[in-house]
Image (cartoon, rainbow, N blue to C red):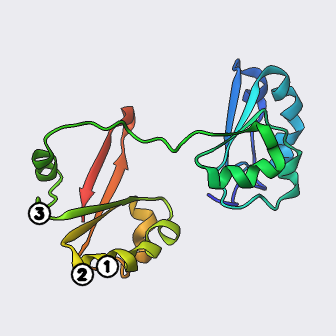
Amino acid sequence: MEGKLREGFMDTSPLITEDYEVLIIERLEWFPLDKLIQVYEQIKRKAKVVYVVHERKLPKNRAFWKFDFDAVVCFDERYARRWRRVYKEKVHVIPYSCHPIKLGDQRKAREDLNIPLEKLVVFTYSWSPSLHIIPTIRPVEEVSRKYDLTYVVMEGRRYLWEYRNKLRKDFIDIRFETHLSRGFTLTFTQ
């Protein structure tokens, strides 16, 4: 939960006792930084530390800048430009992961997913509707006036609840996902 862990408890002992060569950190500002900084030098002696950037802006929390990462990974050049101002040559772009193209029977896939064969498909998946879904509704709606399309929105139920009224449009097809153990994902249609 964003911001909820900053003051909370953090058991740092596994970071010291466990055997590992690389520590990958994401969303550092969500951690209790004062607890982590106390053991950070011990971590650096045993492992490389890689920071994966998700932040749209450079962090404002001064404690964040006490952490000297071995590498900073961004998903695209927009993020990299911003982070290179601070971390210079330590910044690396690794494009956002996408599943390799898997050729198959498009008709069968659409039937299995209950997506009309004749419609164009616009697809969105996001954990933050206010950032990634709500701003796209108006432009997709404009395009839907010209083209017969369905806007498939894949989301966890808890994130969409407060936006349910804005998403009640004929061209929007909301799908919910549930992660199960062993890496399986079930998808539900509204």
Tell me whether circle 2 and circle 3 mark residues in contact (CB < 8 Å): no
Q: Are marks 1 and 2 in contact (CB under 8 Å)?
A: yes
On the image, the x and y values in percent for residue 141 come to: 31, 79
- Spatial CA span between label 1 and label 2: 7 Å
Q: Which residue in the protein does label 1 denote?
A: 141
What residue lies at 70% left-to-right and 60% top-to-bottom?
A: 3
Vertical relation: 84 (above or below) 68: below
User: Mark number for residue 145?
Assistant: 2
Q: Quadrant location of residue 185?
A: top left
Say which residue appears at 38% left-offset and 77% top-offset: 139
Instruction: Decide: is 122 above or below 14.
Output: below
- Vertical side of 17 occupied by 83: above or below: below
Q: What residue does disc 3 label?
A: 118
Which SS class for mark 3? Answer: loop
Q: Position of residue 37 (x, y in %)?
A: 86, 41
| Residue nearer the viewer, 183 or 149 | 149
